[in-house]
Structures are given as structure tokens and as C-alpha cells.
Image (tube, grey):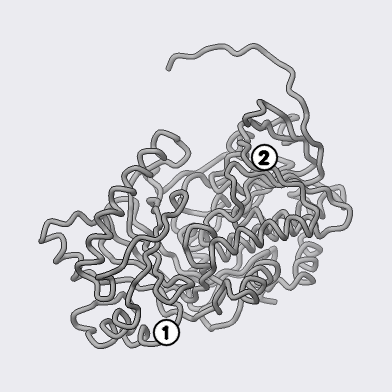
Amino acid sequence: MKTITVPACEIPVRAEVDVLVVGAGPAGLMAAQSAALVPGMKVMLIESRGILGGNMTIGLPLLGFLGRKGNEIIKGLPLQFVERLREKGLATHHRACPLHVSLTMIDPEGTKRLAFQIIKECGIELLMYVFATDVIMDGNTVKGVIIDSKKGREAILAKRIIDCTGDGDIAFRAGAEMAYGNENGIPQPPTLMFSMRGVDSRKLRDAIADNPDLYDIDFIPNEFFRTDDNCTVVGFRKQIKKAREAGYEIPVERTIFMTGMAPDEWWVNMSRVNGVDATDPEQYTYGEMVCSDQNAEIVRYLKEYIPGFENAYVDRVAPFMGIRETRRIIGEYTLTEQDILNCSRFDDVVAVAGYPVDLHHPVGGDCSLYWCPDSYDIPYRCLIPKKIDGLIVAGRDVSMTHLALASARVMGPAMALGEAAGKAAALSIKDNVKLRDLNVAGLQTALEEEGVYLGR
């Protein structure tokens, strides 16, 4: 590759803070709020987009708030966030689901507004439309980040940095050891969500419930859908087969859509571009373009083959693809799929999760699901990259295997990990210790005082 040499230059320091959170998705929002609730902490949150909430704003349900036994396992700040939305009619209850264990629908626009409100309430300094493009290192310790924006290059110095980019951008630039995708380096594929309105939901629900032989549904009894309640519909494999025989090009093996907040609103989760590396802008661009074309065909399929969609129309398209997997750190501990299926418990637990291993195949158009009998712990060590200090990670870039991440990548666990990372960052400053040397028992006590469920 051709290269050029850029002359050295002085970069202005925009801010010096205690805790800097990079990325304002589900994990980043919780991390910033959690850190800011520790008295005396100066917290800054930066985001490359012009909205807060990340995947909470693209039509996906919140998954993982309930365990297999129906108990709430995601509490603390994430639950408070949902309850504040629910008070305004902008979120549903947590509905137990035989397939996804539980799901909670939220209003994307209401989520954005609540996020801004919480930022103001907590006194968090917010900066959007900036990319963290490099890190400032002192040996193996991260001391700050370099940001780029229309204003130019600037530096932000921080005592602790929380990487909530989803892609491990800060850890990667700091030289942390990283993993990517499966054993062949292929990640789970992304999806571009869109919503349809004008769906005859009563006709859809009754058709599914009345015709189990015709309308095949994965794992869930067809009668489950009779009730006017939030749900995810996964199946209709026979309908996809018929459509393909008629010349339709459908990229997945299953029809997947879920209720929105309005009675006639359903969000569709069916586009798929295998092999896309979302850390490469060229590939990311290609994925967005392909998903857009796929969605046009999917709309045509739904209107023709799925009862209730005959007069439906596209209402909204998500502002960006939902990315399931890119980089993951190699941390002090790597959570495995065996840990999940065995309901493993850890002394340094900082979050409890119960969502199944939900693997969208990196090759092909199908999915596989594997459930644990109850729930499992995520240890603090998964958030700490090996050999790098001053940095903690939260969200889907934590230290897990490819299959383990297929469970912990969803937003409920991501939010819980964000809360744990934010509290850990603040307490490590308060106690003047490295993040890897933090008294985890004290962190656990602080989290439990905030309402976090740690299964103890």
C-alpha cells in the first residue's frame, strides 16, 4: 500500500477528565451514568453519531432482562432506564419468551430523548460528532485519546478510559491483543432493520395460531402469538421456500419480525451480508448498500406471503446496520460457551445473563440457538485487557469466545457490563489502584447498592 509521511504537529487538549467513555450505545450510556454517580467524578462521553443509544435506536427489542426462570436478572441502571421509558408509555413489560427467554420493546425516539435527559441530570460532559482515532500512551497505560472532527484533531486526557465502541477501537489502538469472528476470522453478519406499519396484527396473530401446519414457527407454540402482546416471530421457513421457488431472493432461512410500540407496527430483522468487516469503511458501505437492496425484496416477500402484511408499508429504516460482532479483547479471562451452558458462577461476577447462544451463522443464512438452564455470571476479568492499563471495556467487545459472544452481545447484558465498567473506573480512581488491581468485592457492593443483581 502506498504511504505518505505526515509532519509532527501540536494537538490542542480539549478536555482533561477523570473518566472518559468512548461510545454512547447501550453500554456507554450506562457506563457514563454509573461513573458519574460516584461523588466527585468528572465524566465525559463522546460519540461519533448525532444520536445516543446505539442499537437501542434501530428497532431492536431489549433482550436478556429475564432469566430462564422468569426472574429479573438485569437490574440496576438498565432497569431504571426501562422503567422511566415505561412510565411514559415508551416501553413494554418484560415478556417471557420460549425462544429468546424475554424481550422488552422500547420506542427509539423516546430512548434518544431519555438518554439526553440522563446526561444532563448526571452532569456528564457530552461531545458528539467526533471519532476517537488514536490513543495517548505512557508505556502500556492509556492516558487519553485523539479525536477528529470538523474542528480538526484534538486530545482528551483521562485517568481512566472505558471502551464502549463495540468494535474495541480504543483497545485495538492501544495495542491490546484482540480476537475477531470465528475460528476462520469470519464474524456474525450484520442486519439493517426497518419497520412496517399498516400490518393487520389480528389477522397475522390468528393465522399463526390457527395454522401451525402451514406456518412453522421455531421453538414457540403457535398459540403463543394469539395474545395481543409483544413478541418476536421467527420461522415461516416454508413460506421462504415457496418464495424462492417463485424467484424471490431472500438472504435468510427464517422470517424474523417483532412487534413495535404501535398496534400495527412490526420491525423486520431479515437482511444479511455475510463476511462484512464493520471495522473497514469500504466493507461497511458495501453492507449498507446490499442490505438496502435486500430489504426491498423482503418487503415484497412479506406482502405476498405473510398474512396481515398485504397492505403494510415501510415506515422507518434504521439509521445504520446492527453489527453483531467484530473485534473482541483478549482479557484476563475469556468467557466460553461451556461457561454459559453450564451456568458458571464466578467470585468476581459483575453481571448476570441468561440469553441463549444465538448464533447467526457467519456462512449461510441460518441461525443456531443453545440455552443454559438458568443464567450465568460474567466475571470482571472479561472487561480487563491483558497488559494494557488505564482501560476497561464493556459491550460486545469484551473477552469472550465467538460462541459465548453470541449470547452476551445483546443489549441487556451490554447495559449491565457498562454499569459495571463505569463503577469500576470511578472506584479505581477513588482508591488510586489500577483497574486490574481493583477490590472486586468493593465493586460488587457498590453495584448491589445501585440495585444490580449479582445472583448472590
Q: Earlier in the sequence, mark 2 or mark 1?
A: 1
Q: How far from the left and from the top, in percent, is residue 114?
A: 66, 62
Q: Secondary structure at mark 2?
A: loop
Labels 2, 1: front one:
1
Q: Is residue 101 left or right of residue 113?
A: left
Q: Which residue is at a point 10% across and 60% down the rendered structure image?
A: 246
Q: How far from the left and from the top, in percent, is residue 36?
A: 79, 55
Q: Which disc is residue 387 wearing?
A: 2
Q: Is residue 432 left or right of residue 333?
A: right
Q: Which residue is at a point 64% across and 60% down the rendered structure image?
A: 113
The quadrant the N terminus occupies is top left
285 is higher (above) or lower (below) than 108: above
Q: Which residue is at a point 59% across and 64% down the rendered structure image?
A: 110
Binning the other alpha carbons within 10 Å of mark 2 as few (below 14), some (14 to 19) or many (20 upward) gives: some
78 is higher (above) or lower (below) than 398: below
Q: Is residue 436 left or right of residue 413?
A: right
Q: Amino acid at mark 2?
A: Lys
Q: Nearer the viewer, residue 409 or 200?
A: 200
Whether residue 32 is visible: yes
Q: Which disc is residue 228 wearing?
A: 1
Q: How far from the left and from the top, in percent, is residue 290?
A: 31, 45
